Image: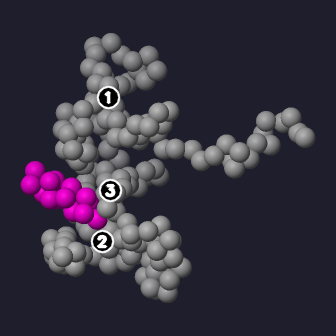
Amino acid sequence: MSTDRTQTSTVELGPLQMSEIILHTMKFEEMRAWYRRLFGNVEPATDVDSEKKLGFLPEVDRICFLRLHFQYPYTQVLGLFEIKDLVKPAKPVPGLDHMQFREASLAKLFARYEMLAAAGVMPFSTYNHGPATSFYYRDPDDNVVEISAVNFATETEYLAFFQSEEFKRNIEGFAVNADDYIQAWRRKQV
């Protein structure tokens, strides 16, 4: 048996859990309000507003951590770091394309859409991708935020769809009108 620690397999370690997404912003108050609304007015787990620069990130003026999920020892957090002198690149650069957050069901996805719409937050694109339905939003800094829910009641059905001819013919799915799509789905539920 090898005593070399590099021989440990990922099976022995288990999967990593996503813990944080950190966004730099010059629009701290607007971003914090937007994400609190998106997540249902979740209270910040940490909100640091200090004249003293933070030692580990001297350019950061304020920090806000919104805790989305906590099941000790795991936590999922969206962090906002205010950096007052950011410069937005003129064209796309390598890096994050978008963030996806998953609802437990289509019913909850549609309820969140309606809650956000009532507050004036509208998706710029809505898709039935086949395995899941997704609503795409832009935050105040123009980051793309996808909120989705699976289209199937069971994991077996969900995974089987990826092997279907329908999926192979159209892996992107199709654009939908959110309101019409929700109404059609609700009629089927009755």
Name the chief secondary structure element in magenta: helix
Rendering coords of residue 106 (x, y %): 28, 65
User: Separation of disc 3 and disc 1 at Cα?
Assistant: 21 Å
Q: Which residues are magenta?
A: 106-122
Q: Residue at x 52, y 44 (%)?
A: 17
Q: Residue at x 26, y 20 (%)?
A: 49
In the rendered view of the protein, which quadrant contains the C terminus? Answer: bottom left
Residue carrying label 2: 127
Q: Which mark is residue 103?
A: 3
The amino acid sitting under disc 3 is Glu
Q: Image quarter for residue 100?
A: bottom left
Rendering coords of residue 97 (x, y %): 40, 55
Whether residue 19 sits left or right of residue 137 in the image: it is right
Whether residue 15 sits left or right of residue 44 in the image: it is right
Label 3 SS? loop
Q: Any magenta on residue 90?
A: no
Residue carrying label 1: 45
In the rendered view of the protein, which quadrant contains the N terminus? Answer: top right
Seen from the viewer's position, the closer of residues 18 and 159 is: 159
Furthest residue toward right = 1
Q: Which mark is residue 78?
A: none
For the residues labelled 3 and 1, say whether their Cβ atoms are less than 8 Å apart. no
Viewer-side label of 2, 3: 3
